[in-house]
Image: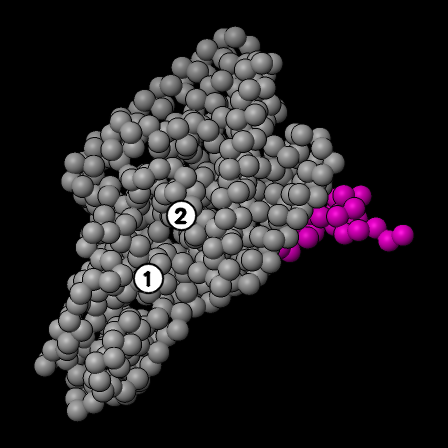
C-alpha cells in the first residue's frame, strides 16, 4: 500500500524540511508583493506622519506611535525612499524572523507535529496582513515568536545566551507595540522559573535571576511613564468592555473569518479551538502543580494563562479595555502553540490526525482569502490609491472631492504622493455620522456604539455641498442616493473597499 503524505513526511525528515522552506519562501513573496501593492491605510499614514515629526518627547502623546516601527520606518525611508514598500519594509523583514521562530519551535516536537505547527502559526490571513503593513504588530509578532523559540532552547540546553536573546526580543516586542507588555511580564516570570530549576550552578542561577529582575525593572520604569501618559490622555480607548470571551476571543475569531461568506462558522470554529487551547493549558497547570515539573509545554501554557489573566486583571482593576482584534493578536501564536504542544503531550493516537486536520482547514481558508488588494482592519481604505489614479487620469482642471472622515488621511497622503495639486478634498461626513455597517470599523471598539446604530435617523442630502463636483464615499451613500432619486454617475468602484467615485449629474 502506498504511504500517506503524512507518513512519507515523518519517515523522511528532509522532505518535510524542503516543504517548509518552499512554503516559507512562498509566504515571504506573498507578504512582499502585498507590501508593494496594497493602498496605504489610515493607521499607516498616522505611522508615517509620526515618523516625519518624531522626537523622544512625543512617545507618550499618541498610542499610534509604535516606537520600534517608527524608528525602523525612519531608517527605511532614508535608505529606500518614499514608497509604500519602503515604509512597510521593516515589517516585511519581520516575517522571516517570525517564520524562523515557528521553525525553531517545531524542532522541539515530534516529526508528525512539525508541519502542522508551522502551517497553523502562519496560515492565518489576519496575522499575515500585519507583515505587509507599516504598523508595529508584525514586528512585535516576529520578535515574540523568536523569544519563545529562545525560551525553549534555553530550557533544553541551559545556555544563558538563549535566555539573553529571549529577554531582548521580548522587550523589543513591547517597543514595537505596548500591547505585548501583557506577554513580556509572564515571559520574564517563566524564564526566571526555568532558570531556577535548571542545571545551572547555584551561583549562576542567583546572578542570572538578579540580572533578569534588574533588566525588567529598568525596562518597565523606562516605559511606565509613557503608558501612564497615554492612559491619562485617554488614548488607550480601543477595545472591549464586556468580557474576555466575547471581546477578545470572538473578535479574533471574526478577524480569522476575514469577512468570508462562511464568517460565522469560521468564528465559532476559531473560538472552539481557543477554548480547547485554554482547557489544555489548565490541564497542564494541574499536572505542574501535582508533579512540580516544568517541561516545554508547561512553560508555554503558563505564559498563555498569565497573559490572559494580565489583561483581565487590568480590565477589572484599572478599567482598561480588553484587547480586541489587532490588539489581541499576541494571543494567536500562544493559542496555537498550546494546542499543538497539548495534543502532542497527550500521546493519544488521534491527536496527530486532529492537528493535521485543523492545519488543512486553516490552509484551505488561507488560500481562499489570498488577495493583493486589501487587508482586514482597514479594508475601507483599499481603493483610495486606484480611485485617485483614475481621477487624475481624467486631466480635469480642478477637482473638488467630497470624502468622509475615514478616507481623509489616505486621500491627503496620495494627493501628496501622486503630486495631484489640483485635487481639493473636503470632508463632508464625520466619523460614524452614518450607519455604514463596516465590519472593520465596529463602533463598539471605539466607544461609539451609542452614536452609530443601524436604524439611526439621518439626512443623506447633507453630504451634498455646492463646492464639491465629485464624491469618493462608501457604497452606503450611493445606495442612499438611489433611494432619494439623487442622480449620479459612477466613475470608479472598488468592491473590496466598498468605495465609489461618483459625479453628481448636473455638476461639472
Q: Would you say residue 186 is visible in this rendering?
A: yes
Q: How many marks?
A: 2
- Membership of 256 in magenta stretch: no
Please give left or right for residue 134 compared with residue 95 in the image: left
Residue 245 rendering spot, x and y as whole percentages: 41, 39
Magenta segment:
1-25
Between 148 and 248, the residue placed more toward the observer is 248
Q: Could you say which disc has been placed on residue 271 in the image?
A: none
Residue 32 rendering spot, x and y as whole percentages: 48, 60
Magenta span dominant secondary structure: helix
Give the quarter of the image for residue 483: bottom left
Figure quadrant of the C terminus: bottom left
Please give left or right for residue 325 compared with residue 102 in the image: left
Give the quarter of the image for residue 459: bottom left
Of labels 1 and 2, earlier in sequence is 2
Assign a secondary structure to mark 2: helix
- What is the C-alpha distance between the residues marked 1 and 2? 14 Å
Residue 207 rendering spot, x and y as whole percentages: 45, 13
**Colour convention:** one colour
Residue 434 higher or lower than 24, as above or below: below
Q: Could you say which disc has been placed on residue 438 in the image?
A: 1
Amino acid at each position: 500500500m502506498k504511504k500517506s503524505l503524512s507518513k512519507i513526511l515523518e519517515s523522511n525528515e528532509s522532505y518535510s524540511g524542503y516543504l517548509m522552506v518552499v512554503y516559507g519562501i512562498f509566504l515571504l513573496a506573498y507578504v512582499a508583493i502585498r507590501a508593494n501593492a496594497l493602498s496605504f491605510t489610515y493607521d499607516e499614514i498616522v505611522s508615517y506622519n509620526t515618523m516625519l515629526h518624531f522626537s523622544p518627547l512625543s512617545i507618550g502623546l499618541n498610542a499610534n506611535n509604535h516606537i520600534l516601527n517608527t524608528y525602523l520606518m525612519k531608517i527605511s525611508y532614508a535608505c529606500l525612499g518614499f514608497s509604500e514598500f519602503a515604509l512597510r519594509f521593516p515589517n516585511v523583514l519581520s516575517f522571516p524572523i517570525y517564520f524562523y521562530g515557528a521553525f525553531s519551535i517545531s524542532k522541539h516536537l515530534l516529526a508528525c507535529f512539525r508541519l502542522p505547527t508551522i502551517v497553523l502559526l502562519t496560515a492565518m490571513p489576519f496575522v499575515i496582513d500585519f507583515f505587509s503593513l507599516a504598523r508595529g504588530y508584525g514586528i512585535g509578532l516576529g520578535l515574540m515568536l523568536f523569544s519563545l523559540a529562545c525560551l525553549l532552547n534555553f530550557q533544553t540546553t541551559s545556555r544563558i545566551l538563549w535566555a539573553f536573546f529571549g529577554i531582548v526580543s521580548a522587550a523589543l516586542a513591547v517597543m514595537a507595540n505596548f500591547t505585548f507588555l501583557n506577554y513580556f511580564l509572564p515571559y520574564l516570570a517563566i524564564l526566571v522559573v526555568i532558570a531556577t530549576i535548571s542545571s545551572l550552578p547555584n551561583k549562576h542561577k542567583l546572578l542570572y535571576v538578579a540580572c533578569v529582575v534588574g533588566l525588567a525593572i529598568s525596562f518597565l520604569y523606562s516605559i511606565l511613564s509613557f503608558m501612564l501618559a497615554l492612559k491619562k490622555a485617554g488614548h488607550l480607548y480601543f477595545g472591549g468592555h464586556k468580557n474576555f470571551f466575547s471581546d477578545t476571543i470572538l473578535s479574533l475569531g471574526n478577524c480569522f473569518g476575514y469577512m468570508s461568506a462562511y464568517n460565522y462558522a469560521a468564528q465559532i470554529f476559531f473560538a472552539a479551538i481557543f477554548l480547547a487551547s485554554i482547557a489544555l493549558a489548565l490541564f497542564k497547570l494541574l499536572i505542574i502543580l501535582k508533579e512540580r515539573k516544568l517541561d516545554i509545554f508547561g512553560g508555554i501554557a503558563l505564559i498563555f494563562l498569565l497573559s490572559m489573566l494580565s489583561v483581565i486583571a487590568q480590565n477589572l482593576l484599572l478599567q482598561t479595555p480588553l484587547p480586541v482584534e489587532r490588539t489581541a493578536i499576541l494571543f494567536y501564536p500562544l493559542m496555537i502553540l498550546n494546542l499543538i504542544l497539548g495534543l502532542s503531550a497527550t500521546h493519544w493516537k488521534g491527536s496527530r490526525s486532529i492537528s493535521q486536520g485543523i492545519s488543512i482547514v486553516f490552509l484551505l481558508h488561507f488560500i481562499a482569502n489570498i488577495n493583493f488588494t486589501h487587508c482586514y482592519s482597514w479594508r475601507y481604505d483599499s481603493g483610495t490609491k486606484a480611485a485617485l489614479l483614475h481621477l487624475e487620469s481624467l486631466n480635469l482642471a480642478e477637482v473638488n472631492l467630497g470624502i468622509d472622515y475615514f478616507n481623509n488621511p489616505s486621500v491627503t497622503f496620495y494627493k501628496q504622493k501622486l503630486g495631484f495639486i489640483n485635487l481639493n478634498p473636503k470632508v463632508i461626513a464625520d466619523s460614524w455620522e452614518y450607519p455604514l455597517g463596516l465590519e472593520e470599523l465596529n463602533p463598539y471598539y471605539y466607544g461609539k456604539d451609542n452614536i452609530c446604530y443601524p436604524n439611526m435617523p439621518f439626512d443623506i442630502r447633507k453630504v451634498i455641498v455646492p463646492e464639491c463636483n465629485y464624491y469618493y464615499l462608501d457604497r452606503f451613500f450611493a445606495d442612499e442616493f438611489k433611494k432619494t432619486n439623487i442622480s449620479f454617475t459612477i466613475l470608479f468602484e472598488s468592491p473590496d473597499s466598498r468605495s465609489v467615485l461618483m459625479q453628481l449629474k448636473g455638476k461639472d
